[in-house]
Amino acid sequence: MMSVNLTQKPTIRFQALDGLRGVLALTVMLSHMIGVVTGWDALRPLIGAYISVIYFFIMSGFVLTYAHNKNYSFTYFFLLRLARLWPLHCFTTLSMVLIYIYNSKHLGYVPGSYVFDWKIILKNLLFLHGVTPLQFPLINDPSWSISIEFWGSLLIPIILIKIKPLKRLLITFAFIIALCVQSSSGFSDMTLCNMSQFFLASSAIMLGSSIYSLITPEIIKNIRNTKYYEFFLFICLLSCLVGIYGQSHNKFDYLYIIPFIPLMLIDFQPDTSLIKKIFLSEPIQFFGFISFPLYLIHSSAIIIGLQYRTDNPALSIIMAACLSITISYLYTVYIDSPLYRYMKRKIRNIYSRD
């Protein structure tokens, strides 16, 4: 378990946040699978799982600010992010195309002929969705956030860490409030020349970055010693889960950002903390381990069509979920983790010779 030195910020992985990320990835997967078997019923459970994606952005800003060394060049940071995000994005996009080709020959689900258009495929592969006013169809729907996160995270070395933390936080809230005021459909708003989601993601990344930069040894000590702080964290977690379960695209989306902020500090809790133990437990850590592949791979399990092979909706969800989890685990163990370690080592070697 992670033991925090009160004289400095942690120097190892945020394991509890990994577990939290795994839980959020599960909510996205289950939301989509429930949507398919219920015909996308407006009252279905986990309809608000799109909020989980905003939480991903906040966590990315927090963790990447922690991991970023001011001595890194921008190119080095760029290549590391590309190595982390692009291989899986490429794998899942091309896998979806292959599945659609198979489906087209066997009367399976195909959303449209655009999935076979090489120009659309290329635009998807190049991380162009959501970062320009020009829009195009997605081949793998969850990938909308990956391209936005990639470009949004580049703001950390370019701009964010150069702004004082408190000022960064105030700017963040100003952006978020402005986005809330102009939005009529919450996080799904597509105004501002189709760039509102990029601005939202960038604001969320800036929020996470600000939270990490504002942490001091005194704050860590205070939260560890404050009576009922853990109870407060459980209330915050419950509030977030309520939003994920039932919130449905309106201005109230923005309110659910607030209770997530304290959850970023779970790793700073004592090892005796119950909420920390929950997120460090093996089952939760397992889903944290496969969270990134699970988030992008589960769409493939959906379009394979398992949900149409049984009249039992619960069984359909279980079958698709088990397939998604199995493929995600195998991909993580045999491709994702080794490949990223290899690419990161090569990038470091290139820059160590300069």
Image (cartoon, rainbow, N blue to C red):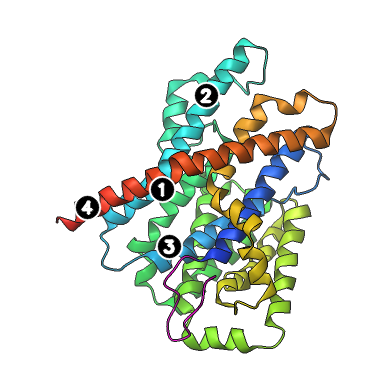
Residue labelled with disc 4: 349
Q: Quadrant of residue 296?
A: top right
Q: Please identify the quadrant where the C terminus is shown.
A: bottom left
Q: What residue appears at the point 64 percent right and 54 percent down from the top-left corner?
A: 24
* In front of the other: 273 or 25: 273
Residue 53 colored magenta?
Answer: no
Label disc, if present, on residue 97 of the rendered structure: 2
Is residue 159 at all visible to an observer of this figure?
yes
Callout in the foreground (2, 1): 1
Q: What residue appears at the point 85 percent right and 26 percent down from the top-left corner?
A: 311
245 to 144, vertically: above or below: below
Counting from the top left corner in percent of width and height, residue 116 is at: 50, 19
Mark 4–mark 2 CB contact (< 8 Å) = no
Counting from the top left corner in percent of width and height, residue 45 is at: 80, 48
**Mark 2 Cα-neighbour bin, 10 Å: few <14, some 14–19, many ≥20:** some
- Label 2 to label 1: alpha-carbon separation: 22 Å
**Mark 1 Cα-neighbour bin, 10 Å: few <14, some 14–19, many ≥20:** many
Q: Earlier in the sequence, mark 4 or mark 2?
A: 2
Label disc, if present, on residue 84 of the rendered structure: 1
